[in-house]
Amino acid sequence: MSRAAALRTGVFWSRIGTRFLPFADVATKELPLGRLLRLSLFQISVGMAAVLLTGTLNRVMIVELGMAASLVAAMVSLPLLFAPLRALIGFRSDTHRSLLGWKRVPYIWFGTLLQFGGLAVLPFALLVMTGTGDGPALVGHIGAALGFLLVGAGMHTTQTAGLALATDLATEETRPRVVALLYVMLLVGMMVSALVIGRALADFTPTKLVQIIQGAAVLTMALNLIALWKQETRNRAATAPSAAHPTFGATWATFIARPRTLRLLVAVGLGSAAFSMQDVLLEPYGGQILGLSVGATTSLTALWAFGMLAGFVWAGRQLADGADPHRLAGFGGVAGIIAFLCVLFAGPLQLTALLTVGATCIGVGAGLFAVGTLTAAMKMSDEGNAGLALGAWGAVQASAAGVAIIIGALTRDAISAAAIDRQLGSTLAVPTTGYAFVYAIEIVLLLGTLVALGPLVRGAAPSPVPSARFGLSEFPI
């Protein structure tokens, strides 16, 4: 092959990759794709920890270890205690004082150590707590609570500082695609971890549980070390102990005083609650109302994950083309309303296909909403203040999602019990009523999200292509 032909072939494949492969065009000279993918490994470790805490250990503690569901729920919810602190963590990483010249690296490193320590403690604490280990059960309870707290604190610290570091490294033009790629990696970490851990625990034994959790601890340390290696440039002048830094209270007051900031955080809270309230209800809804098998209901979660992945990819492409992140988040809210309507009517109509469409659209809407609002938060950050903005977004998102999951489950139980006892009338005395009430609440929350986002879209830079269609900016304040 001649030199000219080889050059043409290379150009052809380069164009094919940029056009069709997701995030192939996210790389820049300052942040090559290999370096970005290496940095994104911290999201893999966070996704793995999330699967262990909310999925694997949740089921193992209740089914195999015979623990009370209320105690398990309390343990699993402990990491949420650190969610409101993400804004403070982000601010501290913005203003960290260090002779080494690093701002983000120390927080990612200590977050990694917290994750490692929590995962190292958890398996032995669980065995002692259930009586299969040596020592009083109280020691096991304390150890398990400490383990969940450490893992939760490590996840929130690592993710907040890691996203801030990615923001520092990326250019303003590529940041939206970088955000989308990082969340794709988070989802990949969750999906791969769920498959591997599920297969490894197919034949459950306490020894296997210890081995898997300890293996996850070692893998967390390895992934995060690789992710950190030679990422942040040392700047001793910026992190010198003598450098003047504002207090968190003053910085937060200035940040939250902006009307657009407060409105965006309200939208993030409402939307996150709306998309998360049904997290523990979708599979039971398919099994109890539509009579689906365990395999069929598990496929609903797979469809949700596929939809979210598609939402991440599409959001990255749209933002790369200059789309307004607030409008994109609004499209995610609209997709969520359509999705919950499909799920809501799938039960009374006994249409499994409608439920599968709804599950997929929930993922698409959640993906668009997450990337859109996070990109908007990044745009609101000042120079050197990215950690505070990303931490505020993460604090509101995680706190709202956690509270919504608990409220959704309690609401479903209360409404279903009242309906079965005919306290709501004979027409509503069916198992569907509790689920329908929760899905209706989620639709109302998404409508409130669109109302909150409307003025933000209206205040954005005008699109180069005028449109007469009814959009988010026409929603009332």
Image (tube, grey):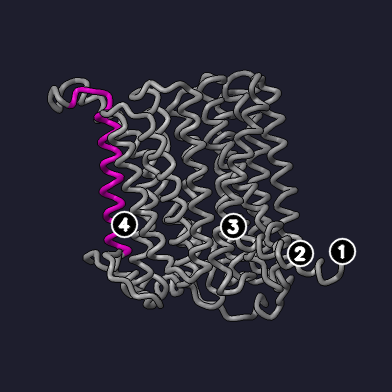
Q: Earlier in the sequence, mark 3 or mark 2?
A: 2
Q: Is residue 435 magenta?
A: yes
**Hey, what amino acid is under mark 3?**
Leu
**Image: 201 above or below 170:** above
Instruction: Residue under label 4, please give it.
Output: 449
- Seen at 38% across and 21% down, the residue is 291
Instruction: Residue under label 2, please give it.
Output: 9
Q: CA distance from mark 3 to mark 2?
A: 27 Å
| Other-residue count near label 2 (Cα within 10 Å), few / some / many at <14 / 14–19 / ≥20 | few
| Other-residue count near label 1 (Cα within 10 Å), few / some / many at <14 / 14–19 / ≥20 | few
Question: For the image shown, how many numbered marks are present on the structure?
Answer: 4
**Magenta-highlighted residues:** 428-453
Q: Earlier in the sequence, mark 2 or mark 4?
A: 2
Q: Which mark is residue 1?
A: 1
Determine whether the residue tagged by mark 4 lies in a helix, strand or loop: helix
Q: Marks 3 and 2: which is nearer the front?
A: 2
